[in-house]
Amino acid sequence: MRTLLASSVSALVLAVSVSAVGEAQTRVSRADANAAIAAMGLDQSRADEISFDSGRFTRSDYVFTNVVFHIDEDDSEPTKAGEDDFNVDFDGGELLVEEMRFSAPRLASDGRVMFDAFSMSGLSAQGDDGEGLSLDSLEIAGPDADFAAMIAEAFANPGESEDEDFELGEDPFDRIAMSGFQVVDSEDGPTTVSLGSMILEHDDAEALARFEMTDFLIETDEGDDGPVRIALGEVRIEGLSTETTDEWFAAIENDNMSSFMQSYMNAATVNPASLFSEFVLSDFDFQAAGIDLSLASVTAENEMRRGEVHSSVVMDRLHFSADSDHENGAQIAAGLMMLGYSELNLHAVGNTIYEPERGRAYTSGDNYYVVEDAFRIDFSQDVEGYNEYSALMAELVADAAENGEDASEEAAMAAMAALQVNEFSVRITDQSILDRAFGAMATQQGIAPEQARAQASALVLLGAASAGPMVPAPLMSELTSAVSSFLNNGGSVTVGMRPTSPTSVGDMMMIVEQDEPDIDRLGISVSAEPAQ
């Protein structure tokens, strides 16, 4: 029997900080509180498992100080773990808690323990092989009857309850939070997992939740290819729709993949506001195997205005570089250096307006990707038919999952055929990538960069000649002229499509497959602009 560590830490992984969230605390008598405390085995009747310096009743709270959970040795066969598994073992040790508090502990009419809030502070444990665990605070506010009973059961029967499955109800708590969490495993070299804070709040009246996590870090010297570091400064979600997430959990629990996919596709394609109002991620850093990938920030916002969802995304500086002194990184660094780069930095902006009732999504304002000192891609689109597309894709994925097969290409194309393209365009602007690419090509072939450009232009003309009657002559002339100008002079090239009449993706596929395709109906245009 592992005593309380496994059970309370499993609750800990779910949990964290709480006050009564503005609600008046339930008043309980000393006798009621003592009955609940005894039911959890916290009345000194099991001092060999749980001991403490003091336990006192004050203003409807029961407060314990200097609590010690004595962790029994586990005599069962150890689970076979892989070489790189993170495995922290505190068997035979002690979990120390400076203070543990139950707010308004009492017994419900069914005999189960209830309380308004539960908190621990100053947690720590040490293993024989250098393992360590510490947690500044862990609090749970407003647990429902089932969640409170689960926590109480973990105290009362830790060895019996640790392996039992527990399912949270629809509204299991008001707020849960932790701060200052850290685990260290030293068995195969130092590995540290730490978390500054985590908070999850739930507002039942609005069916909304808020999640925030800060200062997450994993560090180890024992990765397959050397040290590994994964860090995240902050991730935050505001206005998380518990109505939508409850739909997902219920569908998954009932093995209703079709229902889950329908709800998911609706949120992904036409109504992201049904999932959250704001998402923020900042200061992400990944370093491993000679690779350095970092992200300064990404922010997404969804706002409902008069039946429309206005959605925006801003990604600031996604950085990529490679360590030339590392075996894996050296190959990548050499490839970047051929183009004259020591690093790549990407920025992106997107603005989309969704019309859920109509199943339409169209861009508005700035929409682009930029790789610094390389190129910029601007795009716009106006597409509808997403409601039918989502329904077909949901059915397609659900059927494939239930049958254990990959989705058929025919079914996927049928779903795509439901989309109607009103307008689409993409513009690529050279910001030195052409000079770099032709310079690298020239170096490899031992020719001048101008010759490399001429070769690329010749390939464009050769491709145009081989297209034959498939592409109307005026469009082919536009294409070859624009692409050749772009390759030789830089600037930008734009490809646009504005069908002369409503045209679905299915119509486009039929047009392309015709012996003499009516390309003019698609309203395709290609143009180039010189460098500014």
Image: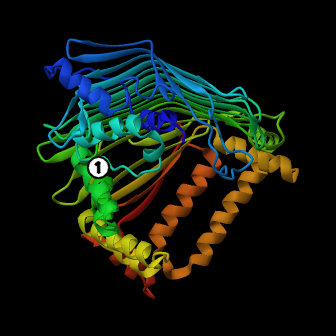
The number of discs equals 1
**How far across and down, in percent of the image, does residue 31 sit?**
19, 22
Out of 529 and 55, give the one closest to the viewer. 55
Where residue 63 sits, quadrant-wise, is top left
Residue 273 makes an appearance in the image: yes
Residue 271 makes an appearance in the image: no
Q: Amino acid at mark 1?
A: Thr
Out of 415 and 205, give the one closest to the viewer. 205
**How far across and down, in percent of the image, does residue 401 sit?**
43, 72
Side (left or right) of 324 relative to 306? right
| Image quarter of the N terminus | top right
Vertical comparison of 194 with 270: above or below: above
Where residue 120 sits, quadrant-wise, is top left
**How far across and down, in percent of the image, does residue 50 sit?**
47, 26
Residue at 43 percent of width and 75 percent of height: 400
Residue at 40 percent of width and 27 percent of height: 45
Per the image, the residue denoted by label 1 is: 245
